Image: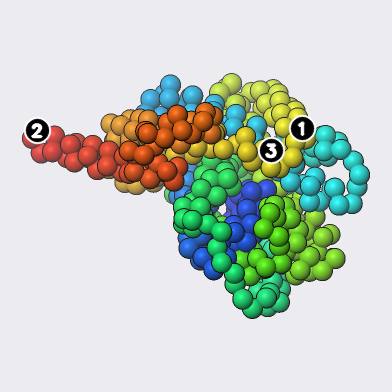
Amino acid sequence: MNKTKEVLITSFALFSLFFGAGNLILPPFLGYTSGNDWFIVTIGFAITAVLIPILGILAHAKLQGTMFDFGKKVSPLFSSIYCFLVYLIAISLPAPRTASVTHEIAIAPFFNNSTLLTSTIYFALVFVFVINRSKIIDLIGKFLTPLIGIILISIIFIGLITSPVAVSHTFLEAPIVNGILEGYQTFDAIGAVVVGAVIVISLNLKGNNTYYDRKELISKSGWIAGAGLLVIYAGLILCGSLFQSEFSEDATRIEVLTGLSNFTLGHFGTLLLSVLVALACFTTAVGIVVGTCDYVKVLFNNSQIAYIITAILSCIIGVLVGSYNVGFIIEIALPALMFIYPITIVLILLNVIPEKYASNLVFRVVVLITFIFSIPDFLKFLIPEEKIQSIIDIIPLANYSLGWLIPAFISFIFVNFYAFNMKKNI
């Protein structure tokens, strides 16, 4: 296989592994709520749903190991706990959510069956793909992604040329912050550290033996996949804002997405959207479960039995959680996201920058500060917010659920300044 073809197939696979339930239902709704501030919202959304995830892929291109390598500079114990939490969250929330979205959009309009039956069949198929591990990139990159792309581009193109002329007002108080936080709900930063490892192992299985060949392939594929995600997100957000007047003020995420497909593709759009949702969600679920199984397999000395058992347990969790509705899963995901997302973003950034700015000490201090200052962000989803409001008020950006950002940046500058001064004095 020539390099260009391999880069494209890997890019398509990455795009599909990223583009799942949240990536499909969140942008149109974000556009609907943003109205004439759609561009500002897109910038915020792109930071957490495109830029950070692609930097995560670049970090994998540099490390070429497992997710454990992302946190090992903090300490092996921290990295082990971090990996356990990320994989647990991934198989308990974003993976099952793909089954729930598939049921509500692709199955419920046509069949009167229970969500439990849908999630059971869905994860049975996921299991089949996960067991056929060595063929993942080709199956997804060659066949599934082109279908997803064609349907998405059709919805966006027709939406742009047939939409109402006027763009309405925004419902959002801080559009860029709303975009950033809604980007959390895609789980793509977490997805990057999970599926990036899937890509690395897949390339190893295919015989891409040199470090630099793999680094170049993964890096190029990451940027191409990122560009594709950005175009699709921007298009869906813009379409959501253009069709804002067509929806009621209490429209749900699912209603906006299905309405948009009907406005652009007519009644046939319902069928096409069903196919799109099923494909987009399925590829993401496969990527998450494969990533989890790969990691557990390494922990148990490349045991195939450990891989299969993990696949079975992941799919059982998927069946059970996936039987709940999308809104419920999104709601219960918020505390977990506010806890793990800031740490994940910081680990991605520290692993991408040059080594001289990312010593073990920098990792330890910045991650610790990030964790401490993100505590109010996830606590307010677990306890009455007024109990911690006095703390939130004194932390910059904490009212926007970004209280960790400035302290993490300051600690990064301070520790590097301290380290360079220590070197000069030696």
Badge 1 local density, few (<14 within 10 Å), some, or many (20+)? many
Identity, as a three-letter code, of the amino acid under mark 1: Val
| 62 sits left or right of 119 in the view | left
Viewer can see residue 23? yes
Badge 1 element: helix
Q: CA distance from mark 1 to mark 3?
A: 15 Å
- Residue marked by disc 1: 319
In this view, the mark in front (2 or 3): 3
- Residue shown at the point (36%, 39%) measured from the top left: 393
In this view, the mark in front (1 or 3): 3
Comes first in the chain, label 1 or label 2 = 1
Viewer can see residue 65? no
- Residue marked by disc 3: 328
Q: Position of residue 53 (x, y in %)?
A: 50, 49
Q: Are marks 2 and 3 in contact (CB under 8 Å)?
A: no
Numbered mark located on residue 270 in the image: none
- Residue shown at the point (39%, 37%) measured from the top left: 392
Colouring scheme applied when the structure was drawn:
rainbow
Answer with the quarter of the image where residue 376 lies.
top left
Badge 3 element: helix
Q: Are marks 1 and 3 in contact (CB under 8 Å)?
A: no
- Residue marked by disc 2: 426
Q: Nearer the viewer, residue 399 or 152?
A: 399
| 232 sits left or right of 155 in the view | left
Q: Nearer the viewer, residue 294 or 242?
A: 242
Q: Residue furthest front?
A: 386
Answer with the quarter of the image where residue 141 lies.
bottom right
In this view, the mark in front (1 or 2): 1
- Residue shown at the point (59%, 47%) measured from the top left: 186
Q: Position of residue 227 (x, y in %)?
A: 53, 62
Q: Position of residue 297 (x, y in %)?
A: 61, 26
Identity, as a three-letter code, of the amino acid under mark 2: Ile
